[in-house]
Image (tube, rainbow, N blue to C red):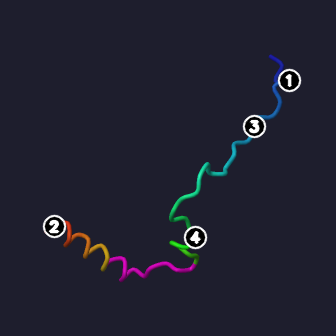
Amino acid sequence: MDYNALGASKKGSKIPRHKEHNAPGTDKNPFGKRPSKEELIARLKAKTEKSSK
């Protein structure tokens, strides 16, 4: 088989087909604004209390 005639394999496109609604750098999720661990735990506890009722 003549592998020279095949040529190089095509690289895949790493660009997503659409943009996420909560992607970093958007209005809903700006860069550098990450919630602290305490805020996250408080939000999760509130959610579990709400769902357990």
Amino acid of disc 1: Ala
In percent of width and height, residue 1 lies at 80, 16
In percent of width and height, residue 46 lies at 25, 76
* Quarter placement of the C terminus: bottom left
Image point 83% across, 30% down: which residue?
Answer: 7
Amino acid of disc 4: Thr
Image point 81% across, 25% down: which residue?
Answer: 6
Mark 2 crowd level (few <14, some 14–19, many ≥20, 10 Å Cα): few
Report whether 38 appears left or right of 11. Answer: left
Q: Which residue corresponds to mark 3?
A: 10
Q: Which residue corresponds to mark 4?
A: 26
Inter-mark Cα distance, 3 to 4: 32 Å
**Mark 3 against mark 4, which lies toward the viewer?**
4
Residue 19 colored magenta? no
How many discs mark residues in the rendered view? 4
Mark 3 crowd level (few <14, some 14–19, many ≥20, 10 Å Cα): few
Q: Which residue corresponds to mark 2?
A: 52
Image point 19% across, 73% down: which residue?
Answer: 49
Amino acid of disc 3: Lys
**Mark 3 against mark 2, which lies toward the viewer?**
2
Residue contact at pointers 4 and 2, CB within 8 angstroms? no
First in residue order: circle 4 vs circle 2: 4
Amino acid of disc 2: Ser
First in residue order: circle 2 vs circle 1: 1
Question: Magenta residues, as a range?
Answer: 32-41
